[in-house]
């Protein structure tokens, strides 16, 4: 199962920060999230939200291993 991490407003919106979700690819994972929580899925589609798989930023669909870590990173602010 992939370990899925949400940060900032994404975690607030979902009501969870970390979950294990069985998915073979990033596209499949997004499909599961869309079915479970359309509002979260919509927030993940924002252009400023970045996705990291195993601590590397990705822009396309990638295969996930059972021990993969997927992090969805909202825009950061601060000073």
Image (cartoon, helix red, strand yellow):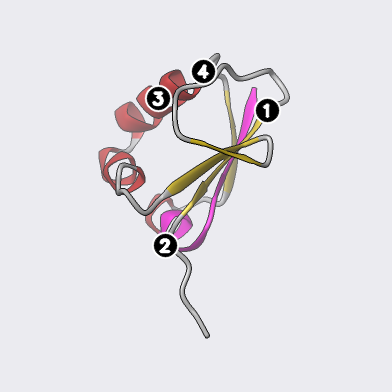
| 73 or 57, nearer to the observer | 57
Label 4 – label 2 distance at C-alpha: 24 Å
Q: Is 10 drawn above or below residue 72 in the view shown?
A: below
Q: Kindly identify which residue carries mark 2.
A: 9
Residue 9 among magenta residues: yes
Label 4 – label 3 distance at C-alpha: 11 Å
Image coordinates for residue 3, horizontal then vertical, percent: 64, 34
Which circle's residue, 3 or 1, is located before the other in the chain?
3
Q: Which mark is residue 68?
A: 1
Q: Which mark is residue 57?
A: none
Quadrant of the drawing holding the N terminus: top right
Q: Kindly identify which residue carries mark 3.
A: 32
Name which quarter of the figure residue 22 lies in: top right
- Which residue is drawn at the image coordinates 67% and 41% (left, top)? 55
Mark 1 Cα-neighbour bin, 10 Å: few <14, some 14–19, many ≥20: some
Which circle's residue, 4 or 2, is located before the other in the chain?
2
Q: Kindly identify which residue carries mark 4.
A: 25
Label 2 – label 3 distance at C-alpha: 20 Å
Q: Which residues are magenta?
A: 1-12
């Amino acid at each position: 199962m992939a370990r899925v991490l949400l940060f900032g407003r994404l975690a607030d919106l979902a009501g969870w920060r970390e979950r294990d979700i069985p998915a073979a690819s990033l596209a499949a994972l997004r499909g599961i999230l869309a079915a479970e929580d359309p509002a979260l899925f919509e927030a993940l589609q924002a252009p400023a939200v970045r996705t990291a798989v195993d601590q590397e930023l990705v822009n396309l669909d990638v295969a996930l291993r059972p021990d993969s870590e997927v992090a969805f990173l909202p825009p950061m602010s601060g000073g």
